[in-house]
Image (cartoon, rainbow, N blue to C red):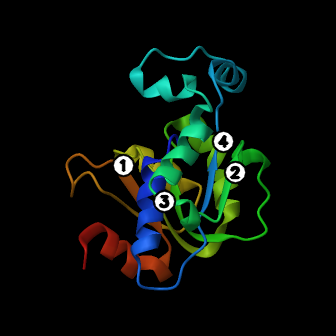
């Protein structure tokens, strides 16, 4: 889930600024197009919370995502944008690195982790947004089997990321968490 693309823009900027060769960066998001689409997908009314205002603008979430990438000249660093439900995505490749914003609660974990697990290579690392405690992280890790994980909140007070990795990605995980 990319919502309107704040994290997507940050990742695309990192790809742009890296010294190494360009990498594949695919984005999958519902791409909700308005209140009626929101209701159709989630069978719930749209909250009046200002963070949901993007659903109501022309083009909805997908339009805002694409506009934010275009405004920052980052579209060329995104390989593929899929606006739809991840349950219907059948990849031709598997990923060794991912950023996930679709594991907020028990229902999302139960629904999405089997899909995510099938999208990952044997060795991988991924960040999951909005993972703030060990109970939440352990529910995600349960679906992965033998995996290490850490939370960013103890290190960075306002952060809310869960980092999950297999053995081959331990050095990268250490770098992400501690910068060394």
Q: Nearer the viewer, mark 3 or mark 1?
A: 3
Viewer-proximal residue among 169 and 158: 158
Q: Quadrant of the N terminus?
A: top right
Which secondary structure, mark 4? helix
Q: Residues within 10 Å of mark 4 (few under 14, many from 20)?
A: few
Tag on residue 73?
Answer: 3
Q: Which residue occupies 66% across, 41% down?
A: 111
How many callouts does the rendering have?
Answer: 4
* Residue highlighted by disc 4: 111
- Rendered-image quadrant of the C terminus: bottom left
Label pair 2/4, CB-CB below 8 angstroms: no
Q: Do the residues labelled 3 and 4 touch (CB within 8 Å)?
A: no
118 shown above or below 40: below
Whole-angstrom CA distance, mark 1 to mark 4, is: 20 Å
Q: Where is residue 42 in the image (x, y as percent from the top left)?
A: 66, 24
Instruction: Indicate whether 138 appears above or below 12.
Output: above
Q: Which of marks 2 and 4 is in front?
A: 2
Tag in front: 2 or 3 = 3
Task: Kindly report the distance in space between the C-alpha atoms of the residues bearing marks 2 and 4.
Answer: 19 Å
Question: Which residue matches tag 2?
Answer: 82
User: Could you tell which of marks 3 and 1 lies nearer the N-terminus?
Assistant: 3
Q: Position of residue 142 (x, y in %)?
A: 54, 54
């Amino acid at each position: 889930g990319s919502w309107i693309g704040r994290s997507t823009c940050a990742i695309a900027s990192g790809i742009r600024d890296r010294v190494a060769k360009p990498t594949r960066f695919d984005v999958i998001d519902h791409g909700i197009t308005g209140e009626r689409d929101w209701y159709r997908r989630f069978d719930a009314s749209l909250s009046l919370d200002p963070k949901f205002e993007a659903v109501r603008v022309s083009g909805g979430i997908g339009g805002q995502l694409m506009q934010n990438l275009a405004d920052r000249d980052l579209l060329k660093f995104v390989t593929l944008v899929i606006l739809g439900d991840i349950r219907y995505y059948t990849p031709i490749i598997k990923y060794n690195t991912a950023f996930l914003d679709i594991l907020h609660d028990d229902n999302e974990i139960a629904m999405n982790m089997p899909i995510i697990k099938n999208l990952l290579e044997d060795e991988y690392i991924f960040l999951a947004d909005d993972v703030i405690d060990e109970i939440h992280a352990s529910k995600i890790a349960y679906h992965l089997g033998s995996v290490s994980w850490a939370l960013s909140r103890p290190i960075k007070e306002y952060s809310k990321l869960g980092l999950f990795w297999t053995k081959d990605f331990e050095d990268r995980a250490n770098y992400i968490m501690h910068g060394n």
